[in-house]
Structures are given as C-alpha cells and as structure tokens.
C-alpha cells in the first residue's frame, strides 16, 4: 500500500531536496525523498524499516516475520511497481546502483 501511495503521490525530480515541506508542496522528490517517506509511513504502521544508502542512490529495507527485504519505491515508480519490491539483498545487489550500501535505521 505504501509503495503504491508514494508512486501515485510523488514524481521524480533532481531539483527537489530531502525536505518534507517541499515533498508536500511539489509532490516531487529524489530517491532519498522516496526512501524517507516510505520509512516514515512504515514507522507509523509499526513496520521495521531502514533507509539504505550508497553514494548514488537510496532505497529501503524492511523486516517482515524476521526476514529482511529490499524495496526501491523510486524504481517502482513506473510501469512495474513490484519489480523492486520485497526482494532479497543478494538480488538487489545485482543492480549497479544498489552496490556498496549502508543501512540507517
């Protein structure tokens, strides 16, 4: 639900920074904005969620029933909203922009 809500609400933009007011006013953001909004919604719903970063991209990791899954809401914001949804770290790491990352809870 949160993945689809954010995909419907936001449009990708290089010009918008990580600023909740900007997201609200413009309905636009970068990968870090998508990840921050997803993390905030998950936290409010009691879902363990982290923002995952590397030098070029940001996405999320959730823990469901003790299993870690990766979700990239920005990359899901297109024709296939579930391509980067609830996949393993090893599968996500196969994509070049998802290498050498760190987790921030």
Image: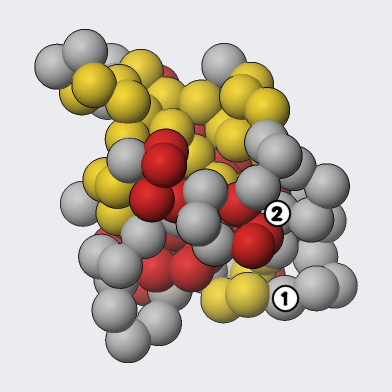
Tell me if residue 66 comes above or below residue 5 in the rendering.
above
Q: Residues within 10 Å of mark 1 (few under 14, many from 20)?
A: some
Nearer the N terminus, badge 1 or badge 2? 1
Tell me if residue 9 comes above or below residue 23 in the rendering.
below
Residue at numbered disc 1: 13
Q: Quadrant of residue 84?
A: bottom left
Measured as percent of width and height from the top left, residue 70 is found at 39, 41
Which of the labelled discs sits on residue 34, or is there none?
none
Which is more toward the observer, 93 or 53?
Answer: 93
- Which residue extends farthest bottom? 79
Measured as percent of width and height from the top left, residue 65 is found at 14, 17
Tag 1 and tag 2, C-beta contact below 8 Å: no
Q: Is residue 40 left or right of residue 28?
A: left
Measured as percent of width and height from the top left, residue 55 is found at 83, 47
How far separated are the C-alphas under marks 1 and 2? 13 Å
Q: Is residue 29 left or right of residue 50?
A: right
Total residue callouts: 2
Residue 44 appearing in the image: no
Q: Residue at x 80, y 73 (%)?
A: 14
Residue 82 appearing in the image: yes
Q: Is residue 78 left or right of residue 14?
A: left
Q: Residue at x 60, y 35 (%)?
A: 52
Q: From the image, which quarter does the C terminus lie in? A: top right
Measured as percent of width and height from the top left, residue 38 is found at 45, 42
Residue at numbered disc 2: 57
Q: Residue at x 85, y 72 (%)?
A: 15
Q: Residues within 10 Å of mark 2 (few under 14, many from 20)?
A: some
Q: Residue at x 35, y 18 (%)?
A: 48
Q: Secondary structure at mark 2?
A: loop
């Amino acid at each position: 639900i949160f993945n689809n809500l954010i995909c419907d609400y936001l449009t990708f933009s290089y010009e918008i920074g990580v600023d909740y007011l900007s997201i609200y006013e413009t309905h636009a953001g970068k990968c870090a904005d998508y990840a921050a909004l997803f993390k905030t919604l998950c936290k409010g719903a009691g879902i363990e969620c982290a923002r995952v970063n590397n030098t070029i991209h940001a996405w999320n990791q959730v823990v469901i029933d003790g299993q870690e899954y990766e979700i990239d809401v920005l990359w899901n914001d297109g024709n296939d909203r579930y391509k980067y949804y609830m996949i393993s770290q090893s599968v996500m790491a196969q994509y070049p922009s998802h290498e050498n990352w760190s987790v921030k809870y």
